[in-house]
Image (cartoon, rainbow, N blue to C red):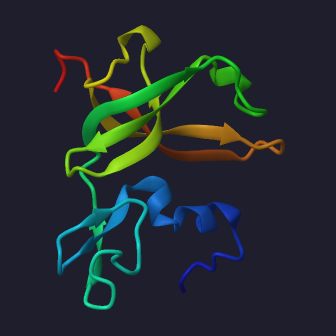
Amino acid sequence: MPLSPISSIPVARRIIKNRYRLIGSLCENCKSMFMPPRIICPNCRRKGRMKEYEFSGEGEIYSFTILNTAPEGFEYQKPYVVGIIKLREGVLFTSQIIGKVESIRIGKRVRAVFRKMSVSEDGFINYGLKFEVIDEGSS
């Protein structure tokens, strides 16, 4: 018997592919890639044939900012870094970047990792993807 997303909040959250994997879309007609996914290609319009595409999760820091004043619920993370990641496939993607703040630089290689995003008032932990800096010596 399949699980009902209505009966359990954790299951409902787990079935959202984009929350846990880098799922975007690819137009089979013009080969353009999009993140977040699109159902219609803005280049090809009706001629486009969109399909789901899972990105590699590897890329480099394109731009970033260090946040020292955090919004409510994220105070425990400050200072933290939010940046634009240029994925290996060429798509730009906004994400939190984790690692030593002093090691974060434009052009540094990063990879997607599964991490805690926030904790609700009732203790429900939300998980998702962040990007971590890849040390030059690691694989």
Q: Is residue 101 left or right of residue 87?
A: right
- Residue 98, relative to residue 51: is it above or below? above
Q: Position of residue 42 (x, y in %)?
A: 35, 75
Q: Is residue 1 left or right of residue 35?
A: right
At 37% from the left edge and 17% from the top edge, which residue is drawn?
104
Q: Is residue 119 left or right of residue 22?
A: right
On the rendered image, what quadrant is the C terminus found in? top left
Viewer-side residue, 59 vs 114: 59
- Name the residue furthest bottom: 46
Q: Position of residue 35 (x, y in %)?
A: 38, 59
Viewer-side residue, 62 vs 135: 62
- Name the residue furthest right: 121
Q: Is residue 3 left or right of residue 108?
A: right
At 41% from the left edge and 79% from the top edge, which residue is drawn?
39
Question: In the rendered image, which quarter is residue 121 located in?
Answer: top right
- Residue 48, relative to residue 121: is it above or below? below
At 56% from the left edge and 38% from the top edge, which residue is drawn?
116
- Residue 30, relative to residue 10: is it above or below? below
On the rendered image, what quadrant is the N terminus found in? bottom right
- Residue 35, relative to residue 115: is it above or below? below
At 25% from the left edge and 90% from the top edge, which residue is drawn?
47
Q: Position of residue 51 (x, y in %)?
A: 28, 78
Q: Position of residue 135 (x, y in %)?
A: 25, 18
The tally of labels here is 0
